[in-house]
Image (cartoon, rainbow, N blue to C red):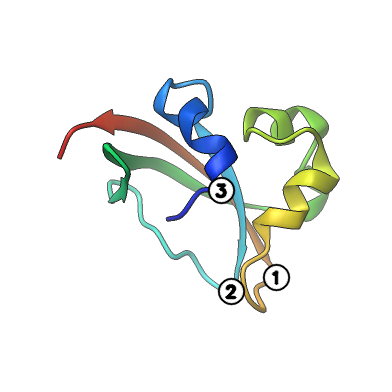
Amino acid sequence: MQFTKRLRERIRSGEITCTIRIWQRPKVKVGGSYPMEDGKVLVTSIHRIAIGDITGELARRSGFEGIVDLLKVAKHGSGTNVYLIEFEYCEGE
């Protein structure tokens, strides 16, 4: 799971602990760990949500200024399913 550079420091600090992704199907799994610079991101939950469930607050929790800012980054390929992914950052390894 990749994150835009502008979010990485806030992920490492624990300020950002969720992300929205628009995929055809989940590309991560609960309990999976995914490398990120000096550590890894550990996925703690994945929930499929409707695009209308994305609020300004959720966008800000994900590190974005608002919904439009988030949607510019969240869509990957031809996906139409929206996923809320909760995670924690772990240092090392």
Q: Residue 44 placed where, x, y %? A: 37, 38
- Mark 3–mark 1 Cα distance, whole angstroms, equals 20 Å
* Separation of marks 2 and 1 at Cα, in angstroms: 6 Å
Residue at which label 1 appears: 80
Task: Compare marks 2 and 1 and give the one earlier in the sequence.
Answer: 2
Q: How many marks?
A: 3
Secondary structure found at label 2: loop
Residue type, label 2: Gln
Answer above or below: position of 77 versus 86.
below
Q: Which of disc 1 and disc 3 is earlier in sequence?
A: 3
Quarter containing the N terminus: bottom left
Figure quadrant of residue 81: bottom right
Q: CA distance from mark 2 to mark 3?
A: 20 Å
Q: Is 42 on the left or on the right of 54, as rendered?
A: left
Dot 3 lies on which element? loop
Q: Position of residue 4 (x, y in %)?
A: 56, 48
Residue at the image position 73 percent from the left and 46 percent from the top: 70
Within 10 Å of the Cα at label 1, are there few (<14), some (14-19), or many (20+) other Cα atoms? some
- What residue did someone put label 3 on? 4
Q: Residues within 10 Å of mark 3 (few under 14, many from 20)?
A: few
Callout 2: few (<14), some (14-19), or many (20+) C-alpha neighbours within 10 Å? some
Which of the pair 93/82 is nearer the observer? Answer: 93
Residue at x 81% of width, y 32% of height: 56
Of labels 2 and 3, earlier in sequence is 3
Left or right, residue 39 beside residue 80: left
Label 3 is placed on what type of residue? Thr
Q: Which residue carries the number 2 mark?
A: 24
Task: Please name the residue shown 27% across and 31% down the image.
Answer: 90
Viewer-nearest residue: 16 or 47:
16
Q: Amino acid at mark 1?
A: Thr
